């Protein structure tokens, strides 16, 4: 299962009760962060979660409201005697940007590993996460992210016995390992059925609606999407500043056939986003207002 918490939902500037953009997930002892706006470590504490297990931080882009909380978070992690490395993923220029921010956090007791994105789409496997970064359309280079927890096929003991596989190897084969004994090689396919549906979360913000979002969000269990503006009259402003309205986000959710959509990254002028959710629901019924620390646990389909 995958624990998901939308830590901050504000765009441009923090407001009372609304911190800047950040999302945190937890899976199998590993925690991942997407964006790290001002107040991220405060809202993590308010949620009752811990930043100690964060080993991967992904950035959509480098505007201040998406990265301004990073130096403080790194300092707190260092002061908590962390020694394990942290992997940072983001558009080209990541190491330069982070090192500039680290003027106020120059010494850390752990290493930072940098993965800089330069292709339209890139895939990484880290700590059980299948991470796909895909370019979206903002006024600077910006990426969305799909996180998947893959799920192998069902184990069939009868297949193992039929293939005369010693029982001592069954567990290792279930975990995807190939095993060679003498001249014989046993493979997971010899004991497993077809891969089952896993868990999928897609997150994008600071973008116009583009096809890459639909393609990568397709069939997501949860789609978290920016809704900078709720009012229909803000269409031109959304186009000018390369953002989205609630209705545009809802159209993406409908086209991608997602199960549920949370809106986030609200304009500071949008103090009551719930007043506009009806417009989104008229397009995609399972549209919901994202709020700071709104959480869900996504689980594997029990019928699979």
Image: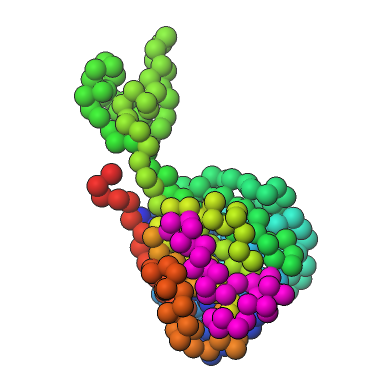
x, y percent for residue 243: 64, 72
Question: Quarter of the image holding residue 259?
Answer: bottom left
x, y percent for residue 89: 64, 55
In this rendering, would 95 be left or right of 245?
Answer: right
Query: Residue visible at 30% across and 50% down?
Result: 301
x, y percent for residue 84: 56, 55
Q: Quadrant of the N terminus?
A: bottom left
Q: Quadrant of the C terminus?
A: top left
In this rendering, would 220 be left or right of 96?
Answer: left
Query: Residue visible at 40% across and 52% down?
Result: 199
**Above or below — where is 272 with respect to 195?**
below
Between 262 and 244, which is closer to the camera in this rendering? 244
Work out which residue is located at the far top of the displayed protein and give it: 183
Between 105 and 64, which is closer to the camera in this rendering? 64
* Residue stretch in magenta: 230-258
Question: Quarter of the image holding residue 212?
Answer: bottom right
Between 258 and 114, which is closer to the camera in this rendering? 258
Magenta region, main secondary structure: helix
In this rendering, would 100 be left or right of 7?
Answer: right
**Above or below — where is 27 with respect to 179?**
below
**Above or below — where is 172 with respect to 93?**
above
x, y percent for residue 232: 56, 81
In this rendering, would 89 be left or right of 19?
Answer: right
Q: Is residue 195 visible?
A: yes
240 magenta-colored: yes
Query: Residue visible at 54% across and 51% down?
Result: 215
Q: Is residue 41 visible?
A: no
Query: Residue visible at 57% across and 63% down?
Result: 204
């Amino acid at each position: 299962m995958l624990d998901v918490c939308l830590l901050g939902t504000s765009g441009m500037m923090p407001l009372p009760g609304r911190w800047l953009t950040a999302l945190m997930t937890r899976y199998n002892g590993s925690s991942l962060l997407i964006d790290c706006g001002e107040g991220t470590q405060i809202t993590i504490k308010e949620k009752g979660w811990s930043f100690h297990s964060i080993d991967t931080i992904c950035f959509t882009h480098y505007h201040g409201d998406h990265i301004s909380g990073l130096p403080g978070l790194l300092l707190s992690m260092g002061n908590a005697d962390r020694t394990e490395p942290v992997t940072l993923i983001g558009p080209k220029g990541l190491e330069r940007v982070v090192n500039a921010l680290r003027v106020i956090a120059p010494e850390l007791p752990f290493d930072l590993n940098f993965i800089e994105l330069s292709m339209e789409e890139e895939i990484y496997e880290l700590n059980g996460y299948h991470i796909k970064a895909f370019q979206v359309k903002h006024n600077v280079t910006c990426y969305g992210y799909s996180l998947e927890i893959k799920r192998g096929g069902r184990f069939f003991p009868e297949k193992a016995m039929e293939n005369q596989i010693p029982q001592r190897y069954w567990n290792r084969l279930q975990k995807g390992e190939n095993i060679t004994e003498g001249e014989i090689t046993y493979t997971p396919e010899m004991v497993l059925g077809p891969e089952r549906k896993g868990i999928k979360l897609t997150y994008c913000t600071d973008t116009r609606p583009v096809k890459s979002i639909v393609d990568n969000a397709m069939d997501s269990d949860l789609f978290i999407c920016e809704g900078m503006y709720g009012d229909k009259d803000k269409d031109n402003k959304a186009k000018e500043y390369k953002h989205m309205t609630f209705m545009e986000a809802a159209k993406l959710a409908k086209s991608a056939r997602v199960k549920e959509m949370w809106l986030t990254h609200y304009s500071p002028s949008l103090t009551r986003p719930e007043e506009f959710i009806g417009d989104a629901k008229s397009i995609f019924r399972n549209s919901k207002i994202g709020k700071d620390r709104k959480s869900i646990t996504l689980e594997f389909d029990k019928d699979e």
